[in-house]
Image (cartoon, helix red, strand yellow):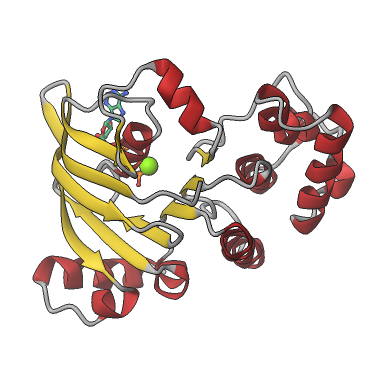
Amino acid sequence: MAAPSIKIVDVVKTFDGDKVLDGVSLDILAGKINFIIGRSGEGKSVLMKILTGLYQPDSGSIFYGDKNLTTARTKDWNALRRKMGLLFQDGALFDSMSLGENVCFPLWFHHLASPSEARKRAKTLLGELGLAEAFFSPISSLSTGERKRVALARALIMEPEIVFFDEPTTGLDPILSSQVDELIVHAQKKTGATVIVVSHDMAATLTLADTVTLLHQGVVVFNGTPKQLSQSDEPEIKLFLSAVNLEN
Ligand SMILES: Nc1ncnc2c1ncn2[C@@H]1O[C@H](COP(=O)(O)OP(=O)(O)OP(=O)(O)O)[C@@H](O)[C@H]1O
Ligand SMILES: [Mg+2]
């Protein structure tokens, strides 16, 4: 199957009476790098969790290609997850496993490679991230930046058709950040995957994204190319970009 497009139609999600997503509609482009940006607490991670079936929307629909996943059962989501790579904002690594086992886990779990083949692939990927020597290290011994790179390797190990990265470079130094950015672009080119990146890094957004979506107050206030974003005259977009520039 080719990387699917993803269609989000009028998605609403409320927590404790607070409407975090208030009718989000968006087309995620197949085989492209799609960035989602917005201020803290605007619901970017919630949207990612809805797109990966971890949260149910209150209303609205999610389509992968022609398939409506909104009312799908766990079995259907699990079938889709075999094609997905996920990097959660907090890493969500398994503390009981070594660094290498964390990276191999998706291949073992989905029976996609023998243990030795999985280890070989994990070591190659970890080598690209400067972590080849740390294969047997416990997760508790890792720095924030190392954990982030392990989570990245785990997301990419299956060469997934759809990849979700929630803030893949937050907490990394500038050199590691650009290595991770390069790896994301390299992985996307190699596999033609549909990539969704949530990021606060405007430099990466403007250089890596094929398309950018700005979430604000529960809705999409911009969707277009990085060039269109930086040239926009919309007051909300200009305010957001100037605030981000001040931060960086
Ligand atoms: N499981 C939950 N229960 C209650 N509230 C939640 C839950 N998950 C998210 N929220 C709330 O939804 C809002 C949006 O959260 P979300 O994590 O999506 O923000 P974000 O845009 O990813 O922010 P950041 O850029 O800081 O990561 C927040 O107010 C958060 O407290
Ligand atoms: Mg978040």
Report which quarter residue 224 is drawn in: bottom left
Report which quarter residue 106 is drawn in: top right
**Left or right of 243, for residue 75:** right
Q: Observer-nearest residue: 149 or 52?
A: 52
Q: What residue sits 59% from the left and 65% below the top?
A: 189
Report x, y in % for residue 24.
17, 45
Report x, y in % for residue 84.
52, 39
Report x, y in % for residue 105.
70, 28
Q: Observer-nearest residue: 132 or 113?
A: 113
Q: Ligand 2: give its quadrant.
A: top left
Q: Observer-nearest residue: 66 or 103?
A: 66
Q: What residue sits 64% from the left and 62% below the top?
A: 190
Q: Is residue 38 visible?
A: no
Report x, y in % for residue 56.
27, 24
**Left or right of 90, for residue 223:** left
Q: What residue sits 72% from the left and 18% below the top?
A: 96
Q: What residue sits 85% from the left and 41% below the top?
A: 134
Relative height, residue 240 to residue 51 (above, below)? below
**Left or right of 25, for residue 137:** right
Report which quarter residue 27 is drawn in: bottom left
The count of marks equals 0
Query: Split into 4 quadrants, where in the image is the C terminus?
Result: bottom left
Q: Is residue 11 visible?
A: yes
